[in-house]
Image: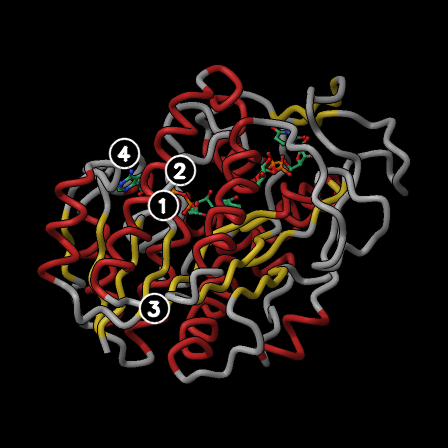
Amino acid sequence: MKILVTGGTGYIGSHTVVELQNKGFEVIVVDALFNSGADVSGKIGKITGTKPTLEIFDLCDREKTADFFKRHHDVKGIIHFAAHKAVGESVEAPLKYYRNNLGSLINVMQGMMDNNIRNIVFSSSCTVYGQADEMPVSESAPIKKAESPYGNTKQISEEIISDTVNTGKLKSIALRYFNPIGAHETGLIGELPIGVPSNLVPFITQTAIGLREQIRVFGSDYNTPDGTAIRDYIHVVDLAKAHVVAIDRMINKKMKNDFEVFNLGTGNGYSVLDVINSFEKVSGLKLNCKIVGRRAGDIEKVWANPDFSNKELGWKAERNLDEMVASAWKWEQELRKRPEK
Ligand code: NAD
Ligand code: WQD
């Protein structure tokens, strides 16, 4: 059974390809390598024994995307990861984000319509909830006005998908990720931030390895037990496994609606200091930290209510915070050993 994974050499995509191959799916990856390297498909091959086919092109290119679908009209399902994802950059360059994130989705869905491909899993984000009024956040929580162009592309994408599903020609599952962190247990694949990372865990591991001098804790005056902001961190391998469940649910016609939305989180909220303490515990290192002011645009706290996903998908995140952080640290150490990186 052939599955197309767009953005499959990226962080979450690569872990998902591994899990799909482990379950016997044939995977074809399309990636423009905007934020990843072609070597990732070889690393996946080392883990699973099968190097996935990789086609390198920009899904915003209508003709190339249409041609791809003509050649691969036997694809049974698509997992669409391909997108730009840096929140701060999206504020500086909104059109880059709207063009890429919406253009690629439209071209992929056009390819589906033209070739009778019915199933698409979409990478959405907890960012669609903004600062939710109630914790934990369930799927029925209102969608708040997006805080960034990036967040808006996720909201608009969900609307584009919903409208297209209404034609009766395709079905979709949108997965709203909370905060994915960690890496594969082999240390062969993981997150590869280009330049200075804006996310907490890559910043921690890069500080520990000596690439950054100090980790800044953004805000200690939030209304939380230790004053630092709270998030629902989820291990990328747990997240990847949920995609296999979603694809199986679509292909084996277990969906209850033609467009379904699921939260992917653990249901546990951890503060910035919890993450730093966990890192110091699992690594045995002391981090150079400094508490500074709040980061613009940050929300105080968010964590998922994963009950609906747990029940409907029969999926549950299994790895705890220490395991997440330890795997991220292993990945960082392996990465810096490699001459090619
Ligand atoms: P990533 O940058 O590691 O992977 C995305 C991949 O898509 C990259 O390899 C990039 O080269 C590719 N890509 C981007 N635009 C493309 C295009 N037009 N054509 C072909 N390839 C293209 O990001 P990730 O963390 O793996 O995120 C995957 C998806 O999950 C994204 O849609 C992201 O918005 C979403 N998401 C990520 C997070 C997170 O914290 N990482 C949280 C919520 C949602
Ligand atoms: C986590 C916490 C920071 C860095 C982002 C996107 C979101 C989603 C996931 C895609 C916050 C604090 C961070 C640092 C710090 N992505 N922090 N020092 O902002 O929750 O979510 O990634 O959909 O849309 O916004 O993640 O890892 O940047 O921050 O204190 O150097 O760590 O203030 O409280 P965030 P993050």
Q: Residues at badges 1 and 2 in contact (C-beta under 8 Å)?
A: yes
Residue highlighted by disc 3: 118
| N-term-proximal mark, 1 vs 4 | 4
Q: Is residue 304 left or right of residue 44?
A: right
Tell me which corner region of the image, top left, top right, bottom left or bottom right, holds residue 263: bottom right
Distance in Å between CA atoms under marks 1 and 4: 16 Å
Q: Residue at x 59, y 27 (%)?
A: 148
Q: Residues within 10 Å of mark 3 (few under 14, many from 20)?
A: many
Q: Nearer the viewer, residue 181 or 262?
A: 262
Closest to the camera, between mark 1 and mark 4, is 1
Residue highlighted by disc 2: 102
Give the quadrant of the C terminus: top left
Disc 4, ligand 1: is the CB inside 8 Å?
A: yes
Q: Residue at x 62, y 46 (%)?
A: 279
Tell me the kind of residue under disc 4: Phe
Distance in Å between CA atoms under marks 1 and 2: 5 Å
Q: Please tell me whether residue 215 is drawn above or below residue 267 in the rendered image.
A: above
Q: Residues at badges 4 and 3 in contact (C-beta under 8 Å)?
A: no
Disc 3, ligand 1: is the CB inside 8 Å?
A: no
Tell me the kind of residue under disc 3: Arg
Q: Residues at badges 3 and 1 in contact (C-beta under 8 Å)?
A: no
Residue highlighted by disc 1: 105
Q: Which residue is drawn at 52% across and 58% down?
A: 174
